Image (tube, rainbow, N blue to C red):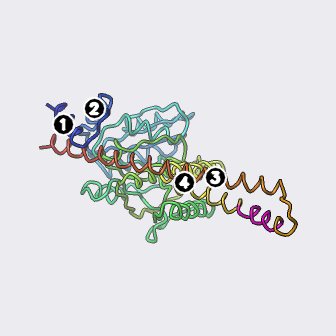
Amino acid sequence: MHEIRLRVKLAAAGVTIGGCVSEVQARHFEERLKRDAPGSGVAVLIPCYNEELTVGGVVRQFRAALPGAEIYVFDNNSSDRTAEEARNAGAGVFFERRQGKGYVVQSMFRKIKADIYVIVDGDGTYPADAVAQLIEPVRRQEADMVIGSRLANSANSEFRWLNRLGNRFFLVLLQFIFGVRLTDLLSGYRCFSRRLVRGLPLFGGGFETEAEMTIKALQRGFTIIEAPVSLGARPKGSRSKIRLVQDGFVILNCMLVLLRDYKPLTFFGGAGATLLIAGAVPAVLAGIQFSQTGSLPVLMVLTAATLLGAGSAALTVGLVLHSITRRFQELDHQIQTLADDIRSDEAR
């Protein structure tokens, strides 16, 4: 009966190939719906890499703040006693062998079923007593993601000036590229609905995962709000795993790739317009020289032709990809709507 309802809804929405419902699409929906079965309430997920000094305290603090929650630590090839400390504190422990926070987040979302997900770093810098204000908007279905903003006006965070500067740079870039105004793009303290977790494809393997999940969630129509949290200092002996320059370039590359994928007309159109303007300069100079001397500067003409041709090609690519992207966005919206309808039917 469940399968029949699924196929009827797919056909009514026009999700077809060759006039009939695609078997691949139907199987994909069925698998997603099985994954989207009701979870176990609230799950607190803690990614860790060499955090033996702090992870036990983090687990105990969140156990006290959320007595009924399931708490899981995902160890990412730690060389210290992180896993043992997590188990001693009462957390379930999973292991992710691919090195990088992004891979850990992907593993968390794939392995854990819950109604509400909380992700928090295992370094002991995020306050457990703020978790209720992150969970409540998701519980009331007012938001799909709540970001614990360390840079909100009411937050009193202990930030190194270089980290603060980097965050501000990416926030300005986010607003310029995607038109989104947030106060903290890279916070590691977040709450998610099951709907978002099951509907958000993540591919980045490193510290760009926060930027990736934020931008993709916004572009796919999920609701994001922020709640102020105060970032504390790391305890003595604990050190940050972020490499400022290298990870900064990874985050920047991630944002540019997402710009290309989600706003291809902006990406290729901007490049095309730049090339056209650059090509117009030698073209005008060649025209002026021809009018004055009667001879054409071959190198200048070739340069202009190359730049103008490349600019025109980039604009064409941007227009074609924009049309394709819009179609897939419409299809994704239909899929999300159908999945929500089917969940509602099952709940009744």
In the image, is residue 45 above or below residue 174?
Answer: above
* Residue at the far left in the pictured view: 348
Q: What label sits on residue 26 in the rendered view? A: 2
Q: Report the front residue among 222 and 140.
A: 222
Q: Nearer the viewer, residue 279 or 192?
A: 279
For residue 9, what is the image quadrant?
Answer: top left
Cα distance between the residues tagged 3 and 4: 17 Å
Disc nearer the start of the sequence (3/4): 4
Q: Amino acid at mark 4?
A: Arg
Residue type highlighted by circle 1 = Val
The residue at the point 20 percent across, 45 percent down is: 341
Q: Is residue 263 left or right of residue 243?
A: left
The magenta region covers 280-289
> Which numbered marker is on residue 234?
4
Residue 249 pos. (x, y %): 63, 50
Q: Position of residue 121 (x, y in %)?
A: 47, 48
| Residue at point 55%, 43% (across, down) | 206
In space, the residues marked 3 and 1 are separated at their CA atoms by 51 Å
- For discs 1 and 4, the disc positioned in front in the rendered view: 1
Specify whether residue 242 is painted magenta. Answer: no
Mark 4 lies on a secondary structure that is loop
Q: Is residue 198 visible?
A: yes
Residue lying at the far front of the rendered structure:
294
**Residue 239 seen anywhere in this rendered image of the structure:** no
Give the label, 3 or 1, closer to the camera. 1
**On-image quarter of the C terminus:** top left
Residue 89 position by quadrant:
top left
The residue under label 3 is: 244
Residue visible at 61% across and 56% down? 272
Closer to the eye: label 3 or 2: 2
Q: Secondary structure at mark 3?
A: helix
